[in-house]
Image (cartoon, rainbow, N blue to C red):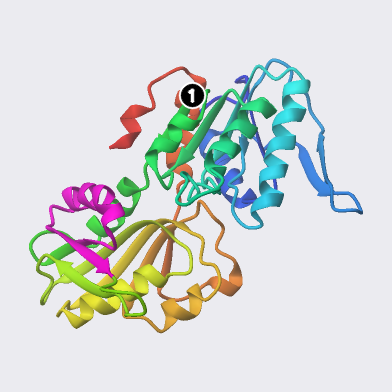
Amino acid sequence: MMSRSTNIKIFTGNANPILAKEIADHIGVPMGDCLVTTFSDGEISVNFFETVRGFDVFIIQPTCAPVNNNLMELLIMIDACKRASAGMITAVVPYYGYARQDRKAKARDPITAKLVADLLSKAGADRVLTMDLHAAQIQGFFDIPVDHLLGVPILAQYFLERDFAGDDLVVVSPDLGSVTRARGFAHKLDAPLAIIDKRRPKANVAEVMNIIGDVKGKRTILIDDLVDTAGTLVEGAAALVNNGAKEVYACATHGVLSGPAIERLQNSAIKELVITNTIPLLPEKQLDKIKVLSVAPLFSEAIERIYEHLPVSVLFD
């Protein structure tokens, strides 16, 4: 834990102040005195009530829903600190919004993951600290250093503490794009890997789910980087049960949980969904089968290492 006399200040917008306070408490510094509100016409107003001149400033703000408001809050806070002569500004973005638009999937598509990276740099951020980008190569969209933390160790530790390991368990990737993440998760649990291969035989014919791997009679854990409408996980869970899985659990770093997600999860074969608090879980989205783990200890250690110029790579394990 740092001394309160250190040259570091932590601020937060309105996206996830509870997580920001938890991170500050772990580090041992008080939350910076800052107020983020709106003018009567909806424009964002930012007021810092203490000096940041020469300080290393960390602004904790996931760009979750409402995405555009939270992103603008972050940009304006960075700009304010830059103009107030902050020593170094790190944008701590536990959940990086717009990350799913990372390439041109069809003609005239925007690449908003790159646009947001440019906005953060242009606003005055010197460094970005984030977790589980939807595609790891988004780090290359930035012209400033990016520290990319991983949620897998936190999620794996939770299941290890509950004796989820060995031959009775199978880790399942819900699609081909998540295989690398699932393989790392399976390695930590010393469990085999299965993959759900979804394909549509022809137009207007329902998708067929093929399970690559043996799940019959096994406890299974679906893992992904985020849960949005929960369609992928719920459909995957149903396919696992139909193929003889004994129990289905699911985990993801980011619980976006938009649209019909809660209703789908409630009525699904998933016994428990484990997520982290990179995005705040609103009261109306809380279910008995949703377990939330804190990323505050990991982010606090990363912030201390960035401040003290120590390697962050040791946190990946």
Residue 163 seen in this snapshot: no
Q: Is residue 190 left or right of residue 113?
A: left
Q: Is residue 121 left or right of residue 297?
A: right
Instruction: Check disc 1 and report its element: helix, strand or loop.
Output: loop
In magenta stretch: residue 194: yes
For disc 1, the marked residue is 145
Quadrant containing the C terminus is: top left
Work out whether 91 lies above or below 15: above
Residue drawn at (66%, 27%), measured in percent from left and top? 122
Q: Magenta stretch?
A: 171-199
Tell me the crowding category of disc 1: few under 14, some 14 to 19, or many 20 or more residues within 10 angstroms, Cα based: some
What is the three-letter code of the residue carrying label 1?
A: Pro
Residue 143 screen position, x and y as percent:
52, 23
In magenta stretch: residue 277: no
Residue 241 seen in this snapshot: yes
Residue 116 screen position, x and y as percent:
60, 39
